[in-house]
Image: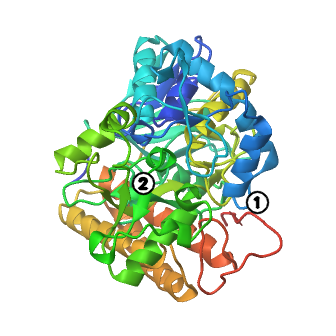
Amino acid sequence: MSATSSAPTRRFDVVIVGSGLAGLSTALLLPGHLQVAILTKRSIEDGSSGWAQGGIAAVLADDDSFEAHIKDTYIAGADLCDPAATRATVEGAPAAIAWLQALGTPFSLEQGDLHLTREGGHSHRRIVHAADATGAAVQHTLIDRVRLAPNVHVFETHSLVDLILSDKHTLEADNTTPRHCLGAYALNVATDQVEAFVAPHTVLCTGGAGKVYLYTSNPDTATGDGIAAAWRAGCRVANMEFIQFHPTCLYHPDAKSFLISEAVRGEGGLLKLPAHLGGHRFMPDHDPRAELAPRDVVARAIDFEMKKHGIECVYLDISHQPPEFLHEHFPNILARCAELGIDITREPIPVVPAAHYTCGGVVTDLNAHTDLPGLYVVGEASCTGLHGANRLASNSLLECMVFARAAVADIAAQPNASIPAIRPWDDSRVIDADEQIVISHNWDELRRFMWDYVGIVRTDKRLERAAHRIALLQSEIQEFYKSFHVTRDLLELRNLVQVAELIVRSAQSRKESRGLHFSRDYPHLLPEAAPTVLTPQ
C-alpha cells in the first residue's frame, strides 16, 4: 500500500524546531514583523524544559560575582569549558532573569526578593527557582505569551524529518555556491503527510538525546532529532561522549523518569545506603564536597556503591528538615512521592542515576550559528562550549535564553533573502505494518546496550561491542527509511541510532577520564584539555 502524497509548502521568515525554553525564547525575542513557525513533535507543553526542577543560575546576590560563577562552571566542566561562551552566558544571566520576571514568571520570593538556593558545584546561593518546578513555571509563562503573539504560528504533532538543503532539495539545485539551509521537512502526524517549512533562517531547539539510554530523566521526546539532522546536513558535532547522568532519579516501579532535584541535596539531603547495610552516609567516602560534589562525581559514587553491595538503589534522606520546610521548597517532589507511598518528611527517597543531559551537540559560535549558513542551534542540541566535560547545575536553562537572544540578534541583522522553489517530499514509499514491531525491538535493544556498554563507567571493549551493534542497526534502519513510508517512531529511532554512533565514536577517541567520561582503560587525565570534534565525511 502506498503512502499519502506530500502536503503543500509553507513559507516563513524563521522556522524554529522545538518548543522548549530555547524555542519559545527565540520566538518571543524575534522582531514582531517576522513570521515565525514553531514545529513541535507532540504538544507545545512537551519537552525537557518543563521537567526542570532546580532552577536557573544567575549572579544576583551581593556576596556573589561573575568570576565565582565562571570558576564554578570551569571546575564542573573539568577545564574543558570555552572561556568566551562561559563568560557570555554568565554575564547574560541577570538580564535573562529580568526578562522572565517582566513576562510574569512566578519565581519564589523571600521578603519580596528572589529566593536564591544553592546546588551541587556552586560556591554561592545563585539559583533562581519557582519552588521545585521551575521549568514548568517558565514554560507555562512563555507558552501563554507565544499564544498571544500574532506573528508566531505553532504546529503541533510535527516531527522533524530532515533539513532542507540548497544543493539537494531545490528544483534547480545550485551546486556552485556553498550549501545552506532553507528550512525543514516535517511529518504532520495528524495528516500523515510530510510538509516543507521553508525559511531563510532555521533554528534547531530540539533538546538532547536521553532516550538513547534505558534509564533517563528525560521525556519521550528527547531523541536527538536536531543533532542527527544537523550531522546529516554536514555540521560538526563536539563532546558527545559527555552524557550527564543525574545522580538521583526516583526509583519505583510506578515512577517513570521522575527527577529528585539537585536542590534537595543543596538544602541538606544526605545520600545513604539501605537500612539493612546500616544506612551509612557514603558521599564523604568519595569526595570532600560530599553531597554537594558535581553530578558526575555523585553519579559514579552511587554507581560504585550499588555495584559493590549488589543493591538496586540508594537513598536520599531529607527527613531531618521540618515538614513545613519540605512543603514550601519541594511541594511537587513531596506530592509525587506521597502518591507512591513515600513520606519524605519521615523516610528517605529511593534513587538511582539516570541519563539526564547531553553536554555535547552541534558546534555553534557565540551567535548560535552552525557550520551551515542559515542554520542555528540553541539549547541542549548545541555545543557552545559552556558545559565542557560536565554541565554545572542550572546552567542549562540559562544557556537557552542567552543564546536565543544571540541568535535573534544575528538573524535580525541579516538582509532579506529570497528562497528558490523547493522540491516536495518524495513519499511514494509503501507502508508496512510489520515495520512497527521491528522498530520497537530495535529501540529496546539500542537503549539496553547503550546503558550496559556506554554508561557511567566505560571500557574499550564495551565501546567496541556497542559500535558493532550500532552498525548493524544503522544498516537495518536505513533500509527501512529508504523503502517504507516514514513514521514518527522510525524517524526517532533513526536519529537515536545516529546519536548513539556519535557518542560511541567520541568516547572511543578520548583516551583519558575527564568529567562525565570515565574509562577504566584510561583512568587518568591528559595534561591538555581538548574538545572532541567530529566532522561529517
**In the depicted structure, whether residue 299 falls above or below residue 486:** below
Where residue 516 appears, x then y in whole percent? Answer: 59, 65
Where residue 472 appears, x then y in whole percent? Answer: 42, 79
Q: Residues within 10 Å of mark 2 (few under 14, many from 20)?
A: many
Mark 1 secondary-structure assignment: loop
Where residue 526 appears, x then y in whole percent? Answer: 78, 76
Q: How many marks?
A: 2
Q: Is residue 333 left or right of residue 263?
A: left
**In the depicted structure, whether residue 25 falls above or below residue 503:** above
> What number is the disc on residue 79?
1
> What number is the disc on residue 223?
2
User: What residue do we see at 46% from left, 27% from top?
Assistant: 138
Residue 176 visible in the picture: no
At label 1, which amino acid type do we have? Asp
User: What residue do we see at 66% from left, 54% from top?
Assistant: 235
Residue 517 visible in the picture: yes
Q: Nearer the viewer, residue 42 or 230?
A: 42
Q: Residues within 10 Å of mark 1 (few under 14, many from 20)?
A: many
At label 2, which amino acid type do we have? Thr
Q: Nearer the viewer, residue 3 or 439?
A: 439
Q: Is residue 279 left or right of residue 265?
A: left
Q: Is residue 292 left or right of residue 145?
A: right
